[in-house]
Image (spheres, rainbow, N blue to C red):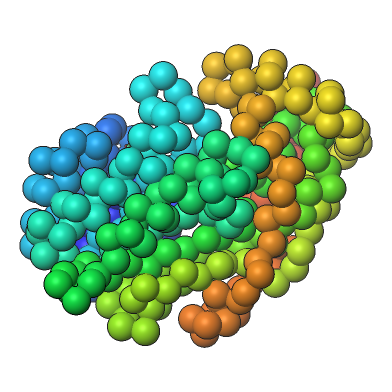
Amino acid sequence: MNICVLGGTGFVGTELVARLALDGHWVRVPTRNLARAERLRVLETIELRVADVHAPSALSQLFTDCDAVINLVGILNQRRAASFQAVHAELPAKIIAAARGAGVRQVLHMSALGADERAPSQYLRTKAAGEAQLRAAAPSAAQTQPAVTIFRPSVIFGAGDSLTNRFARLLRLTAGLLPLARARARFAPIHVADVAEAFRRALGVRASFGQTYQLCGPEVMTLREIVRASARVARLPCHIVPLPDVAARIQGLVMGLLPGKPFSLDNFRSLTVDCVCQEDGCARLGIHPQHMLAVLPTYLGEDDIETQLALLRRTADR
Ligand SMILES: NC(=O)c1ccc[n+]([C@@H]2O[C@H](COP(=O)([O-])OP(=O)(O)OC[C@H]3O[C@@H](n4cnc5c(N)ncnc54)[C@H](OP(=O)(O)O)[C@@H]3O)[C@@H](O)[C@H]2O)c1
């Protein structure tokens, strides 16, 4: 198939694009920054293109000759140049319109578990608005395409994630002391390879048309347990200080003002709802998701070896 993957340069996208290309598909990946995306240029069947995906004319060009479009574009925090509304709600509407114009047969869209129009955070409310745009444009008797398939994962982990790696980095910086907002928030972390597999299994499959799949890993873990597991595997000290909500809000407000917004009030609000599945989308797709504790040592452990080697070298130099 010819597939255009929007957001194909990100954490999930890198995994998915590589797999699709290895499956023999031809994959077009738009990006705002070609230099950052260069690492994807491993197979000739991956075409990188600089494009503004928010421009309908650019989308029409990108979707030319494509059988399927995958949308992975998403942001965790707003920036001046990108609002939640524009990225999560308006972009899907533009995508479906351009896909229809280009004769694309299927749009596979990445949403998020907990997306709900009444959700406490803008992130989750705009994710719900994006889903609604796509469902409203679902094929009718008059229009037969494109079919829409939606994925709602819990938090995603893997080499290059901004979850376990971020906690490991923070613990290294703070000698293990971590003031943690919503330490008891519940997640069902899913491995990035399983998420990519869900897209692969739904691609071009009629049974997935019109479906929404919730994607969860096999175990429910609190945020505190995720941090502890990351620390244990990376062999880092870990002293978690669970923050009361009042302090966590202040943390969100203050950190939301820092460059890169490492945490925000909106992130805090997302954490006030559990991120666990109500149905088993993985089972429906025939996927047995991997356990976080089995996968973590394959990448966090390596960091530890590098750190240890660096420490050894420093000791030897003295
Ligand atoms: N990671 C998780 O734990 C998780 C959990 C649930 C849902 N999700 C959803 O899964 C999707 C992928 O997540 P990810 O972790 O892979 O994200 P990521 O690593 O941050 O990648 C985001 C991708 O979107 C593109 N992008 C970002 N902002 C954009 C903007 N304003 N305009 C156009 N393109 C933009 C980036 O492309 P360029 O920079 O190359 O242009 C990049 O390829 C997102 O929709 C996210 O909400 C992720």
Whether residue 213 is situated above or below residue 180 in the rendered picture? below
The x and y percentages for residue 53 are 23, 40
Whether residue 307 is visible: no
Whether residue 138 is visible: yes
The x and y percentages for residue 41 are 26, 50
257 relative to 53 in the view: left or right: right
Which of the 4 image quadrants contains residue 217? bottom right
81 relative to 171 in the view: left or right: left
Residue at image point 89% right, 36% down? 242
Query: Which of these two is toward me, 38 or 205?
Result: 205
Which of the 4 image quadrants contains residue 138? bottom left
Residue at image point 84% right, 24% down? 247
The x and y percentages for residue 128 are 48, 51
Which of the 4 image quadrants contains residue 12? bottom left
The x and y percentages for residue 30 are 23, 44
Whether residue 201 is situated above or below residue 28 in the rendered picture? below
